[in-house]
Image (cartoon, rainbow, N blue to C red):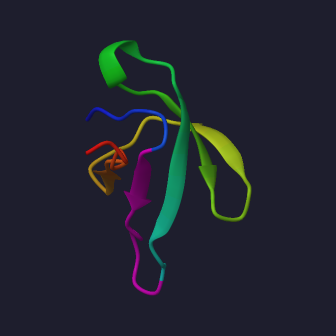
Amino acid sequence: MQATVGDHLLVHGRIVGQHDRVAEVIEVLGQRGNPPYRVRFEDGHETLMSPGPDCVVQHHESSAG
């Protein structure tokens, strides 16, 4: 998994009734876009994350073009 600052991580709920969560990557701490990432969730909570198989990267689209 590789991400850059500005990408979003979609974390799927692991149990029935648990909603998906979205976090914005605010810092990449690994080499060449690899985890861990410092992320900020929609509620403002920040944490370090090494995403697992329940997570998908939504790449930030650049405005160039």
- Left or right side of 10 for 56: left
Position of 6 relative to 9 (above/below): above
Q: Is residue 10 magenta?
A: yes
Give the farthest residue toward the bottom.
17
Q: Quadrant of the N terminus?
A: top left
Q: Is residue 27 left or right of residue 64?
A: right
Image coordinates of residue 23 in percent, x first then y, are 53, 54
Q: Residue at x 41, y 52 (%)?
A: 9
Question: Can you give x and y, in whole percent of width and height, for residue 21 in the image?
Answer: 50, 67
Name of the residue lying farthest toward the right: 44
Give the residue at the far top of this rendering: 31
Q: Is residue 2 above or below residue 17?
A: above
The single residue placed furthest to the front in the displayed view is 65
* Residue range highlighted in magenta: 7-17
Q: Quadrant of residue 15?
A: bottom left
The secondary structure that dominates the magenta segment is loop
Q: Quadrant of the C terminus?
A: top left
Residue 26 at x, y percent in the picture: 58, 37
Which residue occupies the foreground of this view, 5 or 51? Answer: 5
Q: Is residue 15 above or below residue 26?
A: below
